[in-house]
Image (cartoon, rainbow, N blue to C red):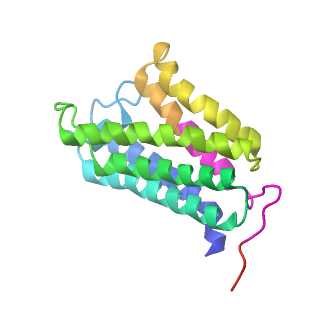
Amino acid sequence: MKRLQPYLPWLAVLSCVVAALAAAAGWEGYSHARHPLALLGTAAAPAPAWFNVFGFVLPGFVLAAAALWRWVELGAARRVVRIGMLLAAISALAFAAQGLFPLDPERMEAAGSRQHALAWTLWWVAFVPGATLLAFGNLRPGLVHALAALALPLSILALPLILPAPLAARLAFALWFGWWLALSRGAPSVPGSRPPARR
């Protein structure tokens, strides 16, 4: 099973990208440059359930499993690193929750829309301190963690001022998935860590 671990982020990326492209291709008039990704999971979309499952839920759960797997492998590493990895898992679960609570663009005050917005916020709010802790904890690749912790909130909060919001959001997703792909390369390495004892 351990051999599958490096491929989990790739599975998540492939699932989300294929779901987004397939769902958009089946909806005449939909544009990735002008419409939010979550719109593909609304009732107005041709196949919202399929997109929510393969665009949000499956990738999120797969990445959460990858993060928890890494957390176990960290063993007796510094607490700051282990907390950072748990925050990464929470971020992945929040990504999945966006598909469990689809957006309703015609009822933004409805419970489902509020829960979707909460999941979206938790997705990046949990990730930023998680990546920051991994960088300060010196979990390799430390520079990647630091850059991701800085670039993700900038793409969400600042880029919409100069780019269409849907494009800025897609860049944020791309940065997040890119971080997971970088994390999947090699076993976790942190000074002073040791694998958990086998019984």
Residue 15 is at least partly visible in this image: yes
Task: Identify which residue is drawn at 76% across, 49% down.
Answer: 140
Look at the image and say whether residue 192 sits in the magenta stretch: yes
Q: Which residues are magenta?
A: 174-195
Taking the view exactly as shown, the residue that stands out farthest to the front is 79
- The residue shown at (41%, 36%) is 121
Whether residue 25 can be seen here: no
The answer to which of 50 and 84 lies nearer the viewer is: 84
Across and down, in percent, residue 130 comes to 59, 44
3 vs 49, left or right, is: right
Judge by depth and name the residue closer to the eye, 17 or 166: 166
Q: Relative to 85, is 125 above or below?
A: above
In the image, 109: left or right of 134? left
Locate residue 59 relative to residue 69 in the image: left or right: left
Q: Quadrant of residue 131?
A: top right
> In which quadrant of the rendered image does the N terminus lie?
bottom right
The magenta stretch spans residue 68: no
> Residue 56: where, in percent of width, then height?
39, 50
- Vertical relation: 179 (above or below) 169: below
Of residues 161 and 193, the one nearer the viewer is 193
Vertical order, 36 against 199 (above or below): above
Farthest residue to the right: give it.
Answer: 191
Number of residue marks? 0
Residue at image x 74%, y 50%? 139
Q: Residue 179 location in percent, x, y?
A: 63, 44
For the C terminus, which image quadrant?
bottom right
Horizontal arrangement in the rendering, residue 51 relative to residue 8 (left or right): left
Q: Residue furthest top?
A: 162
